[in-house]
Image (cartoon, grey):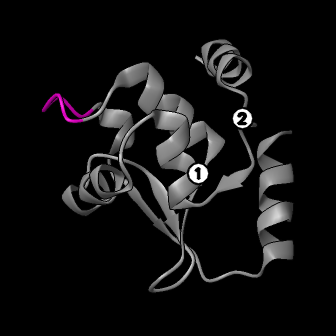
Amino acid sequence: MNGMREAVAREYGFVLFRQYGEEQAAHLLNVDLSTLKRWRAEGPIRYVSMGPRKIRYLGIHIADMLLKGVGSGEVPEAWIPNRCVLAVSSSQVRSLVADLGR
């Protein structure tokens, strides 16, 4: 699966372990911002909440949406639970992302 994610990231021009804001993620997915927000509210996508008004998507989340699709009614088991709420500093996020790459 990681090879497919890497290929999608190269094709669409994003980095798997970089954080993207909602507008950037919607642009990469070629959907309207309101659509991405609706998907998030309905729950079938993964994202990182960094506060009440700061939502981020890792490139890996975007790659998964491009590979698996969204809204088909069939949410893959791997997506449950679908929300990751973190209360960390940006340096802690960098450290966590570095650990994931190992």
Marks 1 and 2, how far apart in space? 10 Å
**Label 1 residue SS:** helix
Magenta segment includes 72: yes
Could you say where residue 3 lies in the image, as x and y percent from the top left? 68, 13
Could you say where residue 58 lies in the image, as x and y percent from the top left? 62, 49
Residue sitting nearer the eye, 78 or 74: 74
Q: What's under tag 2, amino acid-wise?
A: Phe
What residue would you read off at disc 2? 14
Rendering quarter of residue 7: top right
Residue sitting nearer the eye, 1 or 62: 62
Which residue: 61% across, 13% down? 4
Rendering quarter of residue 33: bottom left
Q: Which portion, as a residue range, is magenta?
A: 71-75
Q: What's under tag 1, amino acid-wise?
A: Gln
87 with respect to 43 (left or right): right
On-image quarter of the C terminus = top right
Which residue: 62% across, 18% down? 8
